[in-house]
């Protein structure tokens, strides 16, 4: 059996291509360019004067609201001289009762007093004459002593008549209810013709028209408030009402661990007794480090920021960087800024816009600052 062999001719160009392919098999593949996850804006913490304040809600009430009534029973109201909201002065008549019966009793008491005084005058004269007759031994000692006893009895009757007269005049005065202090009428519970009862509330008066704001503070805030501290309240129409702390309760409620703060409203504006208003107790000013509120990100209920660092190898563009999640402690808020108590330094670059979409280690593109963008424009 014959054996045949055949040879395949190899050209020079095919051999060159084969050598290039073999040479390429020993090299690593070209690195893939890093792609930023997001374009963000950045900032650094800034020093800013922050208003220290305690924000709390409370109720507006009268400083002193007086319940007004009469001390008589069974009389009819003749006139009510005021309406709710009226400003009254001390001693101004507010209400009158039908006082005809009281006037008759007052005249009877005055007549009884005049009669007692006349009897006293006669008793004094008889007693003096009896002493003269006794000296001349024209009457007995017992008769003279009887005249003295009559004088003492007449003096007692005059004292009783004077007391009755004073009582009758006093009751007649009670028939007119007057304002014990200046103020504003806040309630009216009677109409003319009604029969009054002693001790029943007929009118209410806000003394001097003064209002106060009462708020419950927890113990941690209560220790920061002092008498004279300024407060600011927002009225129902959006206007600002001002005042100052008048008193701080010396004891806390053992159940709620809160205590009341009382503040006089020097300019109550549209606020009225019984309203509920949110207020700020202004404690002072401090210079603190702040960041825009947008740069604070909450993860599992805790505040974090994203610190921008250098980009990883392979991303040498200056506009790229990587972010690192960092826990911070925040304090008070003022407008769009939050106080940063701890966790960052003033040199660190912090992500602002877009921070809420970042994750730890993300590559980001840094948007040019407004200053740099303006400088780049021709």
Image (cartoon, rainbow, N blue to C red):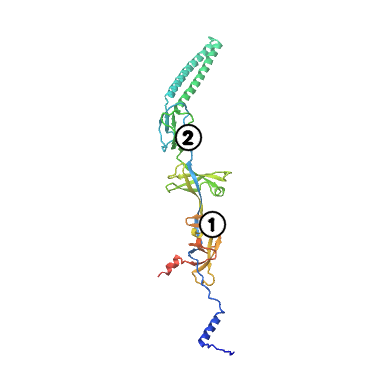
* Location of mark 1 (residue): 330
Q: Is residue 354 above or below residue 113?
A: below
**Disc 2 versus disc 1: nearer the observer:** 1
Q: Secondary structure at mark 1?
A: strand
Count of numbered badges drawn on the protein: 2
Quarter holding the C terminus? bottom left
The image shows residue 63 at horizontal and vertical percentages of 48, 40
The image shows residue 311 at horizontal and vertical percentages of 53, 69
Q: Is residue 313 left or right of residue 100?
A: right
Q: Tell which of 141 and 43 is nearer to you.
A: 43
Q: Is residue 237 above or below residue 326?
A: above
On the image, which quarter does residue 94 sit in?
A: top left
* Location of mark 2 (residue): 67
Please report the residue visible at 43 percent of the width from the left and 22 percent of the height from the top.
Answer: 104
Q: Is residue 168 above or below residue 207?
A: above
Please report the residue visible at 48 percent of the width from the left and 36 percent of the height from the top.
Answer: 66
Q: Is residue 246 above or below residue 90?
A: below
Please report the residue visible at 52 percent of the width from the left and 14 percent of the height from the top.
Answer: 147
The answer to whether any part of residue 347 appears in the image is no
Q: Tell which of 276 and 111 is nearer to you.
A: 276
The answer to whether any part of residue 154 appears in the image is yes
Q: Secondary structure at mark 2?
A: strand
The image shows residue 155 at horizontal and vertical percentages of 51, 19
Mark with earlier residue (2, 1) = 2
Report, in whole angstroms, how far the alpha carbon at label 2 lies from the one at label 1: 49 Å
Dot 1 surroundings within 10 Å: few (below 14), some, or many (20 or more)?
some
Q: Find residue 160 and name its label.
A: none
Q: Residue furthest front?
A: 1
């Amino acid at each position: 059996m014959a054996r045949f062999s055949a040879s395949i001719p190899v050209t020079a160009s095919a051999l060159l291509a084969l050598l290039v392919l073999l040479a390429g098999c020993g090299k690593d593949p070209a690195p893939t360019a890093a792609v930023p996850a997001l374009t963000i804006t950045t900032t650094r913490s800034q020093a800013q004067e922050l208003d220290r304040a305690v924000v709390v809600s409370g109720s507006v009430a009268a400083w002193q609201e007086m319940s007004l009534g009469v001390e008589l029973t069974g009389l009819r109201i003749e006139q009510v001289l005021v309406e709710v909201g009226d400003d009254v002065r001390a001693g101004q008549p507010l209400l009158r009762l039908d006082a005809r019966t009281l006037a008759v009793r007052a005249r009877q008491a005055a007549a009884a007093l005049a009669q007692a005084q006349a009897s006293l005058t006669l008793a004094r004269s008889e007693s003096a004459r009896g002493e003269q007759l006794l000296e001349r031994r024209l009457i007995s000692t017992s008769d003279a002593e009887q005249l003295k006893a009559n004088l003492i009895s007449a003096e007692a009757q005059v004292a009783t008549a004077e007391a009755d007269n004073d009582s009758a005049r006093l009751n007649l005065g009670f028939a007119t209810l007057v304002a014990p202090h200046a103020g504003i009428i806040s309630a009216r519970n009677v109409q003319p013709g009604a029969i009054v009862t002693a001790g029943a509330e007929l009118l209410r008066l806000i003394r001097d028209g003064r209002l106060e704001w009462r708020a419950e503070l927890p113990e941690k805030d209560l220790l920061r408030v002092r008498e004279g501290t300024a407060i600011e309240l927002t009225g129902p129409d959006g206007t600002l009402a001002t005042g100052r702390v008048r008193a701080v309760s010396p004891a806390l409620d053992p159940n709620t661990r809160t205590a009341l703060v009382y503040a006089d409203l020097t300019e109550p504006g549209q606020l009225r007794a019984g309203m509920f208003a949110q207020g700020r107790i202004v404690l002072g000013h401090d210079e603190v480090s702040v960041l825009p509120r947008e740069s604070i990100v909450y993860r599992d209920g805790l505040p974090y920021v994203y610190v921008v660092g250098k980009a990883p190898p392979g991303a040498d563009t200056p506009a790229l960087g990587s972010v690192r999640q960092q826990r911070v402690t925040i304090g008070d808020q003022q407008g769009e800024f939050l106080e940063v108590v701890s966790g960052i330094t003033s040199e660190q670059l912090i992500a602002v816009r877009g921070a809420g979409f970042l994750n730890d280690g993300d590559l980001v593109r840094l948007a040019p600052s407004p200053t740099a963008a303006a400088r780049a424009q021709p």
